[in-house]
Image (tube, rainbow, N blue to C red):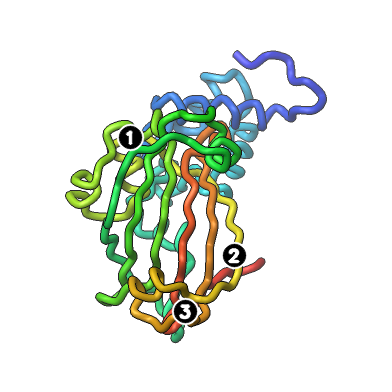
Amino acid sequence: MVNESPTFSPLYRQIKNLILQGLESGEWRPGEPIPSETELATRFNVSQGTVRKAIDEMAAENLLLRRQGKGTFVATHSDPRAFFRFLRLVALDGSVEPSVSVPLECWRAKAGQEAVRVLHVQLGDPIIIVRRLLQFSGKPVVVDEIYLRGDVFEGLSLEVLKEHQGSLYTLFESKFGVRMIRAEERVRAIPADHASAELLGVAEGTPLLSVERVCFTYGDKPVEWRRGIYSTVEHCYFNELN
């Protein structure tokens, strides 16, 4: 039963937070349906309209997915419609191509000052570092160096990465129960150094995009920090502003 609503928190936001708690605890897992609006209204002792407003906001934030005639489902990275949300690369003609992840390295390390600041861990805490290529139509387009919280992704290895078919976020969701909710990115232009030029098959000094991303799961907890180097010879970074 919902407690009396404080003035700074509308009732539908309280319901939203209760549904979020269910998602975070695993009561409703990615791809699964949540109870109907009527059932949730009864459960939380509020009106159906209040529940609908909470669900509408969560659907707008890509936390839930409404399916006409079927109900409301927990959003999942395995849904093809989620592909473009965290990888905004398109071919120069505007087409969206499937990518293939090629893991290069995976090793455990201890968190330094930057990882402490970004991932909110303690100095010396275990982290996992992954290096991989993303290929489009068989050509390398992205080099990623990914820093992950060791306590969240314990058991991740190069073998696990190589065996997985699909996106990295699908692996994180299915094997480790971690769903990426939102991300912050910083993009700047850099020249290709020797290492990135060799991996991406471009000449040293070629203009590249450096994309630094921090990804958050439920509770606004940062769990992934990555530095990606993007070749824009045949692709561009696309973002639609509404």
Residue 198 or 162: which is nearer the viewer?
Answer: 198
Q: Which mark is residue 176?
A: 1
Instruction: Choose top left, top right, bottom left or bottom right for residue 152.
Output: top left
Q: Is residue 150 above or below residue 236?
A: above
Instruction: Choose top left, top right, bottom left or bottom right for residue 150.
Output: top left
Q: Picture coordinates of residue 157 (x, y %)?
A: 25, 42
Whether pointer 1 and pointer 2 mark residues with C-beta atoms closer than 8 Å, the reply is no
Q: Picture coordinates of residue 196 (x, y %)?
A: 40, 70
Tell me which amino acid carries mark 2: Val
- The secondary element bearing badge 3 is classed as loop
Question: Viewer-nearest of labels 1 and 3?
Answer: 3
- The secondary element bearing badge 1 is classed as helix
Q: Residues within 10 Å of mark 1 (few under 14, many from 20)?
A: some
Name which residue lies at 59% across and 65% down.
Answer: 187
Q: Which mark is residue 232?
A: 3
Name which residue lies at 57% across and 38% down.
Answer: 113
Instruction: Find disc 2 in the rendering and name its residue.
Output: 187
Question: Viewer-nearest of labels 1 and 2?
Answer: 2
Q: Residues within 10 Å of mark 2 (few under 14, many from 20)?
A: some
Tell me which amino acid carries mark 1: Phe
Q: Is residue 16 left or right of residue 152?
A: right
Dot placed on the residue nearer the N-terminal end, 1 or 3:
1
- Give the residue at the far bottom of this rendering: 93
Q: Picture coordinates of residue 198 (x, y %)?
A: 34, 74
Q: Is residue 237 above or below residue 93?
A: above
